[in-house]
Image: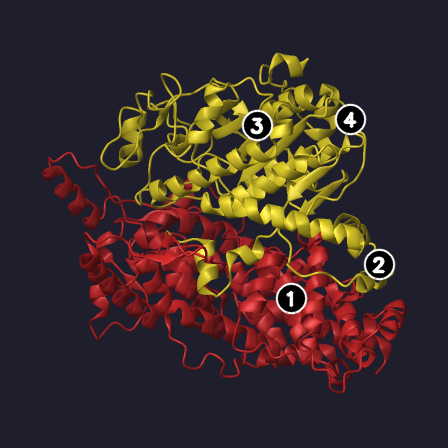
Amino acid sequence: MATADARRAASALNRLGLGARNGEIAALGDAESWALGQLRRRADDLGVFAGLPDSLDYLRKEAQLQQQRRALKREEAGQPAPTVPGKDGKDGKPVNPLARLYARMFGADLRREASARWRLAARSDTPLAERLVRFWSNHFAVSVDKGPARLYAAPMEREAIRPHLNGRFYDMLLAVEQHPAMLRYLDQAQSVGPDSPLAERVDRRLARRADGQPARKLGLNENLAREIMELHTLGVGAHYTQTDVTQFARALTGWSLPLPRELEQDDVRRAFKFRPFAHEPGSVTVLGRTYADDGENQAKAILADFAVHPATARHLATELATHCVSDTPPPELVSAMAQAYLASGGMLPALYAALLQHPVTWAPQARKIRTPQDLLVAGLRAGAIDPGDKPQPWEGFLMRLGQPTFMPRSPAGYTDVAADWVAPDALWKRVQVGEALAERVARVGLDPRALAAGVIGPVLRPDTLTALARAEAPEQAVALLFASPEFQWRV
Amino acid sequence: MSTRREFLRLMGLSAAAAATLTLWPGITRAATGADTRFLVLMLRGGLDGIHALPPYGDPGYAQLRGPLALTPDGPTAEDPAALRLDGTFALHPALSFAQQLYQRGQLLPIVAAAPPYWGRSHFEAQDCVENGTATPDGAQTGWLNRAVATLPGVDGLAVSTVMPLMMRGGGRISTWSPPLPMRVNPILLQRLEPLYAEDSRLAAAFADALANQGEGSGAAMTSAMGADRAMAAGKAKAMGSGGRLPQLMQAAGTFMARADGPRIGFVEDYGWDTHANQAAILARKLKELDAACASFAQAAQPVWSRTVMVVVTEFGRTARINGTNGTDHGTGGVMFVAGGAVAGGRVGGQWPGMLPGQLYQDRDIHATTDFRAVFKGLLAGHLGIRERVLAARVFPGSAALAPQGGLLRAALAA
């Protein structure tokens, strides 16, 4: 293969995909056709999610957990808390039976969800689609740090993002904003219209009470409304006001989840429920346009307009170009992507195609730092490492490298620019992770120099190749490859 | 109720695995100037200043805060009493160490403070707090880094795996976070060193990593492991008092207490965005914050009399509670200035009040103190950075904003 073609093939697999497997670069053929072809295929999940519960199953299990908790509390009322013996033989910390119940009920599910995702990343044959899945998952970030959202982060990616990867952005947006993960993570499930029938009924009940109990009034929570506008659609630079946010929050009231008692009815088919009683009555005005009160559809109409707003096109194009091409993407690339997106009426394939067909995307200057998640996944793929069915080692590495799965510190998700990931301490830990990965690469028939050429060949520097040749053992050479500066980049 | 630690345990990971400590590299250097110490602790998410420092004496407070209102007038069945500071303000009941500092004259809360940016976006507001300007793209480096850069021979420390914006720039900063518990093959490092030297974007960071972590030499490694054990012993106690922040602050204090250690430090914490059920979340978080300040003060004991620490957040929260017993993004918030060098024992700043007509946009505490005035006052008095340099380099565009005086004990401020 000609040098330039090999370089493009490496970019397709390492920068746009999840990391080349040994030999893939040489076998790829024309990089742009391969990349566009990847988008015509669905994100193939290789069946790794088979048998995992869906969000509705998790809601039902949670309802059971609540029942058991109530029973447990009744049972243990008045009894001293049991304790576990500490290391010194004396009684240690009290056992929290409620936490134990949660762990027994959901611990295995959480580990299965995590390991399925690792297996898919290591084995996927549609790595460009998988990168996009992860991109959108991070765009619509939720964090398992928020307990009530915890069970739903992984299902949200399966249920709301994967099915719409090659479809209309609005469909993905709607599926995400109505997903239990997002409704709970950004507090929407509890937001109630201040003049809704539900709030008025509660007010009347409180007025009748004269026992001096503190009033727990129901009302608006504008968290989801603000983050949809700032992070999911228009972007923070767009011209909207506090009033726009509050008006949109009013339209979103009523977007909620089925209650435990409702889950017992057979006709509950979705993990989303619109509650007309909690919905704020009346029209709202957002970005100068008035939306009549149409129940659930009021906020849907606003989302539909946001989805095809020029500010959204620019925001999505900037984020995707930044993720795939450069920390500072050229304005002409961003404009081309935004225009293609708007011209298509908000179709994601148009956005992707504009990216893949732009010469800047394939220019030699294009490069991105591998985030910790990128680094781990690329190492698994390069080393043909089976991540197995225990996610612990991989999640442990990510924790220490500062990028644990589904645990960003804010709804903005993880950043992907070099300034945020290149620091002395971080590089030191990358060397440690390189060694740990190398220990898991099969020794039989291992030729580190051929492996290096096979996975990063076109950017492999001669002195790195020399260092690989001088390594005292094959596994040391592989550690050197994974810890090398070239391997820290998606070039 | 639900914490990162709890999640890690469910995943089968021990939190302690992510929590052993190594040592600060022994960079020998003559101590410079007055040999003072300065630490910024940034709480990301927007601490509700009204909850941390309840203005119980304000006639508008109880009504706007409803069930979240706290008072120092005797504990009720559900709530312990807030800790009275003066006729208007109290501290949240969980801030008992802070109260001790206040009584010793070493804590100065500053009310109604905000960065010059008054929008309500977390990310823009944090960028402004960190870049030291009024706009999110006003600077690509951090003001604390620029402060370090003006002080020859002074190093900074960011307790973080990756460099936070506030510490980015040309000044000499090391990052530190609890390391992986594995040793690195020294030969591998030797071989990587020349390779990284050829990558212009990674070279400097890698060279720092090597220098700081001892290049795998036997002596440095052994003493690193000794420090690990010592830290681990301290850690058990810190973790017992709740969470990772006390552990990180103890590490910062230990490094900064050394004669040749970093004089300027930065620590960050997350999880302060309390849109719902704020009382329970903040009871836990503030307890952790209080323990963290105690850990730092204890670890930094040898230099405490020459230390200033500042707790800062990107914005305050709405004066009124929202419909889910939480608060939404607001404007004026609280800063805490603490340390042996601080002229504390009083509440600083101008309180704008919570009555109708006193709120900013009928919603937030009206900010009356610009963060930069406080930081300029501290950097001038405590680190000896000249006012002209502060206005030109550290906080560009702030020439019209005078450094706030009276923040420091006279002996040191001289």
Q: CA distance from mark 3 to mark 2?
A: 42 Å
Looking at the rendered structure, the secondary structure element under dot 3 is helix
For mark 3, name the chain.
Answer: B
Q: Indicate the colour of chain A.
A: red
Q: Is residue B48 above or below residue B381?
A: below
Q: From the viewer's perspective, is A457 left or right of A413?
A: right
Label 1 Cα neighbours within 10 Å, binned few <14 / some 14-19 / many ≥20? many
Q: Amino acid at mark 4?
A: Thr
Q: Give the CA separation, mark 4 to mark 3.
A: 27 Å
Read off the residue under disc 2. B193
What tint does the image give chain B? yellow
Tell which circle, 2 or 4, labels the residue nearer the N-terminal end.
4
Left or right: B60, with A384 as reference point? left
Same subunit under labels 4 and 3? yes
Q: In the rendered image, which residue does mark 1 sit on?
A: A374
Mark 3 surroundings within 10 Å by alpha-carbon count, few (fewer than 14), some (14 through 19), many (20 or more): many
**Image quadrant where residue A433 sits:** bottom right
**Residue in the image at 60% along x and 15% along y:** B409
| Amino acid tagged 1 | Asp
**Residue B110 image position (x, y, % from top left):** 50, 24
Q: Can you name the residue that lies furthest to the front here?
A: A89
Q: Three-letter amino acid code at disc 2?
A: Glu
Q: Quadrant of residue A490?
A: bottom right
Across and down, in percent, residue A460 comes to: 83, 71
Q: Which residue is mark 4?
A: B32
Q: CA distance from mark 3 to mark 1?
A: 38 Å
Upstream in sequence: badge 4 or badge 3? 4
- Tell me if I can see residue A343 in this picture: no
User: In this rendering, do the residues under marks 2 and 1 share a single chain?
Assistant: no
Categorize mark 4 by other alpha carbons within 10 Å: few (<14), some (14-19), many (20+): few
Give the labeled residue for mark 3: B371
